[in-house]
Image (cartoon, grey):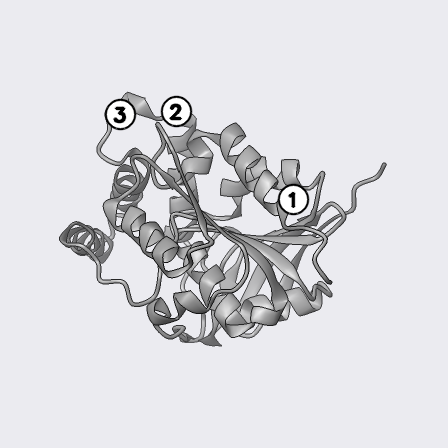
Amino acid sequence: MNVHEEKGIFKATGANVYYETKGIGEHLLFIHAGIADSRMWDHEFHVLANHFCVVRLDLPGYGLSEFVGGNLSYNKMIHELLHHLRINKVHILGASFGGKIAIDYYLDHPESCLSLALLSPAIGGWKDSLFLQQFEKEEEHLLKNGKKEETALLNYKTWVLGGREPNAVDPKIKDLVTDMQMQSLTKPEPDAPCVEIEAEDNITKIKDIKIPVLLINGAYDIQDFRDISKFICKEIPSAQRLVLPDAGHLANLESPERFTEIVLNFFLKNTHRSE
């Protein structure tokens, strides 16, 4: 059986967005983390395409996507992309910042979403720990001084290695994460000014999520993100939460087989809903 595949650049409001689709069935959208691009989903994308019509994109400023100037709203951009692809209902798998975007999108378009699987999601309105505040200061200092390679390494050590010994993580993961970082950090600035329109702080609206929710963290994830997942579970009693041992913030990269099995079972359990 031939599996339908499509790749392209979609001209959204404020950005040119690279996307890929593959497979048939209910639609499943992948939204990557803020230290990555759509390549972080390489394993899951191809496996889940055997069961769903999967869609992944590079957020503007990452991978093959670019800001083009003007105002950019992630909610509007995703809505425009899904409309372009003639997708009315969608399951969403989001990681970290991509998890925040998934939550925000649901709260803006609840009628369009079937289920949410969130890997170490961020959330609007969360008060960062002193650890994260210090990281942000260090990252800002490096970027201000043009130290892009050092910035990429700092992000890898902070988000992926997570205080473990260097040999705790496969070198291929380090290479992938730093390459995704460098591709973003070395992108030229857009010709026209670009303003990101922030979604409102939705921390008080988590209880309004009425669709199935799965939360996944790595055991070595940053404490803020473990706490965020616990908070979401308290706000949504029906939500499930799983912790993958021997993995950090992007647990799918370190435990691809187990992670894929978990999210596949979750999405299959929540298929056959009205389109």
The first of marks 1 and 3 along the sequence is 3
Which residue type does callout 1 highlight?
A: Leu
Looking at the image, is mark 1 or mark 3 nearer the viewer? 1
- The residue positioned 34% from the left and 71% from the top of the image is 204
**Label 1 – label 3 distance at C-alpha:** 36 Å
Classify the position of the C terminus by image quarter. bottom right
Q: Is residue 183 left or right of residue 88?
A: left
In the picture, the disc for residue 268 is 1
Q: Is residue 40 left or right of residue 164?
A: right
Question: Residue 18 sits in which quadrant?
Answer: bottom right
Closer to us: 50 or 208: 208
Closer to us: 135 or 248: 248
Question: Residue 201 sits in which quadrant?
Answer: bottom left
Element class at badge 1:
helix
Outermost residue toward the bottom in this view = 70
Q: Is residue 126 above or below residue 244?
A: below
Question: Residue 197 sits in which quadrant?
Answer: bottom left
Q: Residues within 10 Å of mark 1 (few under 14, many from 20)?
A: few
Outermost residue toward the top in this view = 167
- The residue positioned 44% from the left and 75% from the top of the image is 192
Element class at badge 2:
loop
Element class at badge 3:
helix
Evaluate whether residue 209 shows in this view: yes
**Label 2 – label 1 distance at C-alpha:** 30 Å
In the picture, the disc for residue 235 is none
